[in-house]
Amino acid sequence: MRLACVVHRFGADIAGGSEGHCRLIAEHLAASHDVTILTTCARDHITWRNEYAAGVSDAGPLHVRRFPVARERSLHRFHDISEVVFSGGASPSEQEHWFRENGPETPELLEYLKTHRTDFDRILFWSFRYYQTFFGLPLVADRAVLVPTAEEDPVIRLGILDRFFSLPAGYLFLTPEEQALVQLHMSRPLPTSAVVGVGLDPAMPTTAGSLGVSAPYVLYLGRVDPNKGCGTLLRYFLKGRQDANRSWGAAPLVLAGPANMPIPDDPAVKPLGFVDHAVREALLAHASALVVPSPYESLSMALLEAWNHGVPALVNARCRVLKGQALRSDGALYYHNDDEFARGLEYLLGRPGAARQLGQQGLAYVEREYRWPNVMGKIDRLLANLRI
């Protein structure tokens, strides 16, 4: 098949979850399909500034076609329209305006979809909240597959999405919780869909090397951002360390990812910034536990990657996706507040045998659900069975 994958940002140096998911799925689709990435010239998800060159290039087996962003995001206008829209009672036109201000606004990409729609047998769109999906998918709805990466944040409650969610020919969901969330905000039956998650290869043995940290340590992996729950994570962790009744030992919190917020200058917190794949794998392999504090997730790649190394996790129970993954795998503990967070870390760090058992149960879950042949089989079946 000739496939197009439409995504707001694309590049090996981009740490975003949905962007990384798109790249992984596209690379595996390219083993048996002709795959083109339709994306923007933006690298930064805050400004949408054009940083990549516009035009056509190749990234391994993928053809990449980049379109310039018409204007950088105005944080002032975005803040103003967000206040209007999320206060309730916003008109459909105001809600539509939110998607324009969220960006990245790329009218040339929309024009390309209109004029080249029949060049592709299926067109896959990542993340419903961005301009190129919200405005682009309706132009090619009869052959569109939506990977919504939907989360339980205020955007999903916008009334304008009822009609939008009924448009795609098919859906690829990351978790059962995400599928149920989208269905909850539709008044019509869900189109053809599959819950696929993402695939992982078996983890390779790694050495700690020159990581700059040594076990035991607690790992956070991903963008260090308040929206990812990192402010609460730092507060809970440092509060727990100061409690004389907690026996955490000397295990620090290692933050591996680009920071979009201040990080306390504390010897118990070790920020590493962006790390490459080899360092990422080594950090995962030697961590005592992974912590995932995000209140909003459609799937946590870092959680699956930790289980792939047999590492247990502690996750935010206020996120249904994370709690659901923890319950299905029996590979993680979950917390609702600072006391449960502290007790969870105390359990994982103080009982290494029980922690190893949790990690092995997480690994067994990955083996059952998330190996690439299983994931790609589901995707290929859905693409083949869609009525176009």
Image: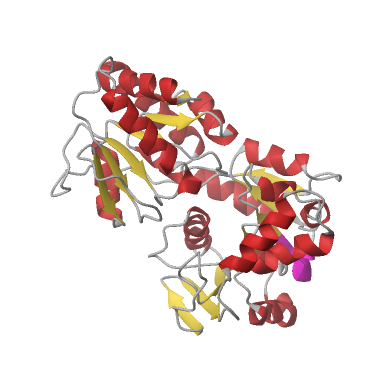
Quarter of the image containing the N terminus? bottom right
Q: Residue 241 occupies which quadrant of the picture? A: top left
Evaluate whether residue 363 shows in this view.
Answer: yes
Residue 141 vs residue 263, the one in the foreground: 263
Residue 208 coordinates in the image, percent (x, y): 16, 43
Residue 355 coordinates in the image, percent (x, y): 32, 21
How many labels sit on residues? 0
Predominant SS along the magenta part: helix
Residue 127 coordinates in the image, percent (x, y): 62, 57
Residue 267 coordinates in the image, percent (x, y): 19, 40
Q: Is residue 231 above or below residue 119?
A: above
Identify which residue is drawn at 53% across, 55% down.
Answer: 18
Q: Is residue 102 magenta?
A: no
Identify which residue is drawn at 52% across, 71% down.
Answer: 48
Q: Is residue 347 above or below residue 325?
A: above
* Range shown magenta: 137-144
Extreme residue in the right direction: 188
Quarter of the image containing the C terminus? bottom right
Q: Residue 344 occupies which quadrant of the picture? A: top left
Q: Is residue 333 above or below residue 44?
A: above
Q: How is the image coloured?
A: secondary structure
Q: Is residue 368 left or right of residue 267?
A: right
Q: Is residue 191 above or below residue 246?
A: below
